[in-house]
Amino acid sequence: MYKNILVPVLLDKEHDTAGSYEVAQALAADGAKFHVIHVMETIPSYASTQIPAEILAHTREEAMQETKESANALPNAEIHLVSGHAGRAILDYADQHKCDCIVIASHRPGMEDFFLGSTAARVVRHAKCSVHVIR
């Protein structure tokens, strides 16, 4: 059983976020701490300078609200928005917060995943803790 569980979520319909929460709860020891994070890809500076600051702030607020609503399934979960490349940001967060387990939902791999690699595959290959992939 795990005491410090990270559940990265993607706010779309392709990933089984509810399944991730169920598995996280099943793997949790009594009093376990849950971290729910959503990674927002960094917008290149040449593009972000063309987007009004209010739009960027509104997008972050919407993502945070959706993540909070989604995380209601996990009691006392810490909710965070993280910026950066998804795979690297998840791994860095897990290391910084000493997570002992990552529960991540994945989609069925497509042809592009064989060349570039999916986020879940990158997390599985490089995580320093246990990783449970939900499909």
Image (cartoon, helix red, strand yellow):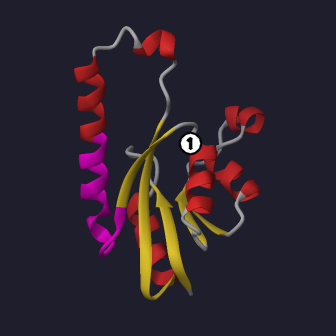
What is the crowding at mark 1: few (fewer than 14 residues within 10 Å), some, or many (at least 20)? many
Left or right, 99 with reference to 112: left
Amino acid type for the residue under numbered disc 1: Ala
The structure residue drawn at horizontal position 69% and vertical position 51%, both measured from the top left corner, is 121
User: Magenta residues, as a range?
Assistant: 63-78
Q: Is residue 105 left or right of residue 13?
A: right
Judging by the rendered image, the residue that carries numbered circle 1 is 86
At x 23%, y 30%, the residue is 58
Residue, x 46% and y 51% (percent of image)? 15
Q: Is residue 65 magenta?
A: yes
Camera sees residue 129: yes
Residue 68 at x, y percent in the picture: 27, 56
Quadrant containing the N terminus is bottom right
Picture quadrant where residue 111 is located: top right
Badge 1 marks a residue whose secondary structure is: helix
Magenta stretch prevailing secondary structure: helix
The relative height of residue 124 versus residue 81 in the rendered view (above or below) is below
Which residue occupies the foreground of this view, 69 or 49? 49
Q: Is residue 32 left or right of residue 121?
A: left
Q: Is residue 24 magenta?
A: no
Image quadrant assignment for residue 88: top right
Picture coordinates of residue 57 (x, y %)?
A: 27, 30
